[in-house]
Image (cartoon, rainbow, N blue to C red):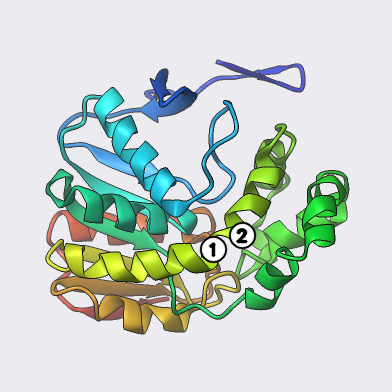
Amino acid sequence: MLKRDDQVVSPPEGIHEKWTQVEGLHVRFWQAGAGPAIVLVHGLLGYSSGPALDCRLYASARRLLAFLDAAAIDSCDLVGSSYGGATGILAASLQPSRVRRLILVSPANPWSRIGRKRLRLLRVPTIAAWFPTISRWARPLQGYSVGRMYGDPKRLTAETLESHFEPLRRPGVLEHAVQIVQTWWGDMEELEGALPKISKIPTLVIWGSKDRTVDPSSAVPLTRCFESVQTAIINGAGHLPYEECPEEFCRIVTDFLTNRSPRKEREVT
């Protein structure tokens, strides 16, 4: 159980909370179900408590593989969201035999042009220095940032909004985000170079049609990198379709994992 703001938060029924050590990092994860492993990788700023981390994408991929070792997972179906999708791609390229199928949810990629001006601003030393402090205390700014990740902000509940705020309170989290920006362009070049190594892994790409964080049109050049790929666009959803449209998202993923989705592309309304 976790303690947060005087409240003890337990995992939902049937889910077991576990901790493991990965390269000196105390990693919290939830485990449920039985059968072949499906590993879900969160997006940016969702990491567990621990020391300062190497901010490079390669380091994140290496930590993911180290987590699989620590959790005794030899191979898995890998689901990665946003920055976690990019991490999953690079991890799979390092050890392709460990990833049976790859599910990428609005993954960060070299072809997305959204947010490039903001990334450049965060490379300005003065802005980079002040950004964590300002963002940590500016609740309206945090609320705007989370809200724009939804295709329909009315779907964003107060509880979900608070769950996005909580990680930002942890020391070093926003500072880590700024450090990631400093290596972003090199990371995306490395990611593009890694894609040919995983071209044979069966892949599902899911995007929200109203994603304002990672450009939905970047799915086109990304999917060309795979020999066996399916694309699902959830109409009206934003960057976090599993939060906005959880039932539809789970159906798409289940269909893919059970081979019930033969078409290469489809739009889900």
Residue 135 spot, x, y in % from top left = 81, 51
Q: Residue at x 87, y 44 (%)?
A: 137
- What is the secondary structure assignment of the residue under circle 1? helix
Which amino acid type is shown beneath numbered disc 2?
Val
Q: Residue, x 48% and y 61% (percent of image)?
A: 241
* Residue 251 is at least partly visible in this image: no
Mark 1 nearby-residue class (10 Å; few <14, some 14–19, many ≥20): some
Tell me the tag on residue 181: 2
Which label sits on residue 267? Answer: none
Residue 184: mark: 1
| Quadrant position of the N terminus in the picture | top right
Asked whether residue 25 is in view, the answer is yes
**Residue positioned 39% across, 75% down in the render:** 233
C-alpha span from label 1 to label 2: 5 Å
Q: Residues within 10 Å of mark 2 (few under 14, many from 20)?
A: many
| Residue 136 percent across, percent down from the top left | 81, 44
Q: Residue at x 63, y 45 (%)?
A: 176
Query: In the shown orientation, is residue 193 left or right of residue 42?
Result: left
Marks 1 & 2, CB-CB < 8 Å contact:
yes
Residue 138: percent from left, percent from top:
87, 50
